[in-house]
Structure formats: structure tokens, C-alpha cells
């Protein structure tokens, strides 16, 4: 017989639930990734193109290399939309999406960045190579997503904490693809 102590703790089981639901939906074949709610720009851009989101501003150029799309650019935080105590980026994940005219994701690529100090002049360079699987990217566009954890170096110093910022001084923001049926 299994005793309750043989099973992972409740918080682990609750954290695992969204992954199980997502896997079940994907296996059922009824779900697809969509970015129809995100701003988009044309793929091929000779001059740098800007795409503003709530907490990040993306500037990029895009080129086609066969079926692939290559994006070069940088992103900067929109400091006026962040809480005034934020002065540090703890973690950042950027995602580039190649999408069709309906917002269906044809390809995506993701990059993770380590923590860094933030300020008005902060900019993070990126390069994404988007490789669509079989789908034509002829009339495709580009969208971006992000998951960011912000903190406060000042709060960390005040509390004499080493490592991540205390929970009371952490702000999370994200925009990205969603599953649609």
C-alpha cells in the first residue's frame, strides 16, 4: 500500500497540474498555439522596425534565408510601466513567433537571459532563427513574447539578503502565445 508520505507534497502536485492539462490537450489534437492577441510586424524589414509591448520594446530587422526567418535586434524595458522600486531584472525569457495572418504560430524560438541591473538605457541584444515545419511562411509576420521576473537590488541590500530578491520585492510580467481549441 502507498502511504501519503510516498506521494510528492501538495504544492508539487498543484504545480504539475497545468503541465498535465496542457499535455492532454495537445495529445487530443484539438489545441493550437495562437498569438492573434499580440502585435505583429512584417518579416522582411530592411530598416529597424519597432514593436511595443506593455513592459518591453523590441527593435529588429528580419531577413528570409530559404524557408527560415532570421531576426536581429534588441529589446529595452519600458521603465515607466514598471513599479518604481524595480531596478533589477532577475530572469528574462524572450520568445519570437512566426505567425500566419490568423495568428497561428508557425514557428517559435526562445532565449533565456540572466539577471542584470535595469535602467533607462538597458538594452538586450537578440538573434532568433525561426524554422517553420512544412507550413509556408510567405505571408507570415513576427510577434514577440516575454516572461520577466523583476526585483530590487535596493531591497536586497536593505534586508542584507544575498541571492534572489525577497518575495515582497518581486514583480512578474509576461506576454506570449496561448492555447486555443
Image (spheres, grey):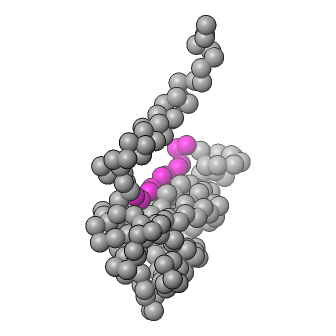
Q: Give the range drawn in magenta.
A: 167-177
Q: In which quarter of the image is residue 89?
A: bottom right
Q: Quadrant of residue 159?
A: top right
> Residue 23's x, y, as percent?
46, 41
Is residue 34 placed above or below 70 in the rendered structure? Answer: above
Judge left or right: residue 111 versus residue 80.
right
> Residue 37's x, y, as percent?
30, 62
Question: Is 116 in front, or is 68?
Answer: 68
Q: Quadrant of residue 153?
A: bottom right
Question: Is 129 in front, or is 95?
Answer: 129
173 inside magenta stretch = yes
Q: Can residue 55 be seen in this view?
A: no
> Residue 177's x, y, as percent?
40, 58
Q: Residue furthest front?
A: 134
Please identify the quadrant where the N terminus is shown.
top right
Q: Tell me the residue at 45%/68% (across/down).
A: 134
Q: Tell me the residue at 45%/92% (across/down).
A: 46
Judge left or right: residue 157 versus residue 52.
right
Q: Residue furthest bottom?
A: 46
User: How many discs mark residues in the rendered view?
Assistant: 0
Q: Tell me the residue at 51%/77% (across/down).
A: 68
132 inside magenta stretch = no
Q: Residue furthest top?
A: 1
Question: Is 137 in front, or is 156?
Answer: 137
Q: Tell me the residue at 53%/49% (across/down).
A: 169
Is residue 24 placed above or below 157 in the rendered structure? Answer: above
Amino acid at each position: 500500500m502507498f502511504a501519503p508520505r510516498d506521494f510528492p507534497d501538495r504544492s508539487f502536485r498543484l504545480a504539475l497540474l497545468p503541465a498535465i492539462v496542457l499535455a492532454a490537450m495537445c495529445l487530443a489534437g484539438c489545441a493550437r498555439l495562437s498569438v492573434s492577441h499580440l502585435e505583429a510586424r512584417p518579416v522582411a524589414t530592411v530598416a529597424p522596425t519597432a514593436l511595443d509591448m506593455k513592459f518591453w520594446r523590441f527593435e529588429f530587422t528580419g531577413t528570409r534565408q530559404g524557408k527560415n526567418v532570421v531576426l536581429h535586434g534588441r529589446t529595452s524595458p519600458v521603465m515607466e510601466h514598471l513599479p518604481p522600486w524595480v531596478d533589477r531584472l532577475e530572469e528574462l525569457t524572450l520568445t519570437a513567433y512566426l505567425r500566419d495572418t490568423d495568428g497561428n504560430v508557425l514557428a517559435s524560438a526562445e532565449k533565456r537571459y540572466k539577471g542584470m541591473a535595469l535602467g533607462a538605457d538597458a538594452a538586450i541584444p537578440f538573434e532568433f532563427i525561426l524554422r517553420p515545419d512544412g507550413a509556408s511562411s510567405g505571408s507570415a509576420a513576427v510577434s514577440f513574447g516575454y516572461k520577466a521576473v523583476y526585483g530590487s537590488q535596493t531591497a536586497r541590500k536593505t534586508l542584507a539578503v544575498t541571492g534572489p530578491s525577497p518575495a515582497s520585492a518581486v514583480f512578474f510580467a509576461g506576454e506570449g502565445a496561448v492555447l486555443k481549441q
